[in-house]
Amino acid sequence: MIESEPDAAVTIFGDRIDVARAFAEALAVHGEERGLIGPLEAPRLWSRHILNCAVAAPLFSGRVGDVGSGAGLPGLVLAIARPDVEWVLIEPMERRVAWLEEQASQLGLDNVEVVRARAEDWAWGRSLDAVTARAVSALRTLIPLTAPLVREGGELVLLKGAGAPNEITAAEKQIRRFKLSDVHVEVIGEGLLEEPTRVVRATVN
């Protein structure tokens, strides 16, 4: 059973709320059977997943890649919240790619491009203004996958849990290797969400 829509949803999505509702319903109905979310996720779909992603939407501009898009968390959610931003959803698994393409079409998201690839096989060089990812891997593993996709002066905006500061410490070697600067944690959605979202931001030089 899908979680009741929290009050914060309308505040966060504004006039895009109906599109967000359609995505939440599709994910609740088909997500488990298609191997996109676990059996315990539907009762917390809004609070733990959709709003956790959507609250980060103001941080993006230009052309943004989402590495390991999976069910569309955060890529599809962010594309719903920010129709003015171009989103490239990078996902290697065929069945997940099919889901992302279906949803982009059904939800009328003409700001979404789906690329079936692993991040390390990205063939377009440092062409993105920013890259995001959520629940993919630890920061020290994620930096080598994401930083090479971002133009000089662009940004990594990676959704993380409460252990984000420790992940930064553990990734010191990768931060130096990939010439990242201004690496810090931002906490977003305090007072709006039950559990705020933590984002690791860094400039790619």
Image (cartoon, rainbow, N blue to C red):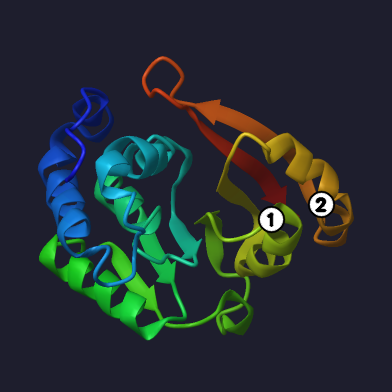
Above or below — where is 76 with respect to 197? below
Amino acid type at mark 1? Ala
Q: Using the image as rendered, state which of residue 135 and residue 180 is in the foreground.
A: 135
Label 2 secondary element: loop
Cβ atoms under marks 1 and 2 closer than 8 Å: yes
Residue 84 visible within the image: no
Q: Upstream in the sequence, badge 1 or badge 2?
A: 1
Coordinates of residue 166 in the picture (x, y in percent): 77, 39
Quadrant of the image occupied by residue 86: bottom left
How far separated are the C-alphas under marks 1 and 2? 9 Å
Question: At 25% from the left edge and 50% from the top edge, which residue is drawn?
Answer: 80
Quadrant of the image occupied by residue 7: top left
Coordinates of residue 139 in the picture (x, y in percent): 70, 53
Classed neighbour count for the residue bearing mark 2: other residues with Cα under 10 Å, few (<14), some (14–19), many (≥20): some
Residue on which disc 2 sits: 171
The tag on residue 138 is 1
Q: Using the image as rendered, state which of residue 48 and residue 11 is in the foreground.
A: 48
Question: At 34% from the left edge and 66% from the top edge, which residue is drawn?
Answer: 36
**Left or right, 203 with reference to 160:** right
**Left or right, 55 with reference to 188:** left
Above or below — where is 171 with respect to 104? above
Tag in front: 1 or 2: 1
Above or below — where is 130 with respect to 46? below
The quadrant of the picture occupied by the C terminus is bottom right
Above or below — where is 90 with respect to 5? below
Amino acid type at mark 2? Ala
Question: At 30% from the left edge and 46% from the top edge, which residue is drawn?
Answer: 82
Classed neighbour count for the residue bearing mark 1: other residues with Cα under 10 Å, few (<14), some (14–19), many (≥20): some
Coordinates of residue 34 in the picture (x, y in percent): 27, 72
Coordinates of residue 144 in the picture (x, y in percent): 73, 67
Question: At 58% from the left edge and 75% from the top edge, which residue is drawn?
Answer: 119
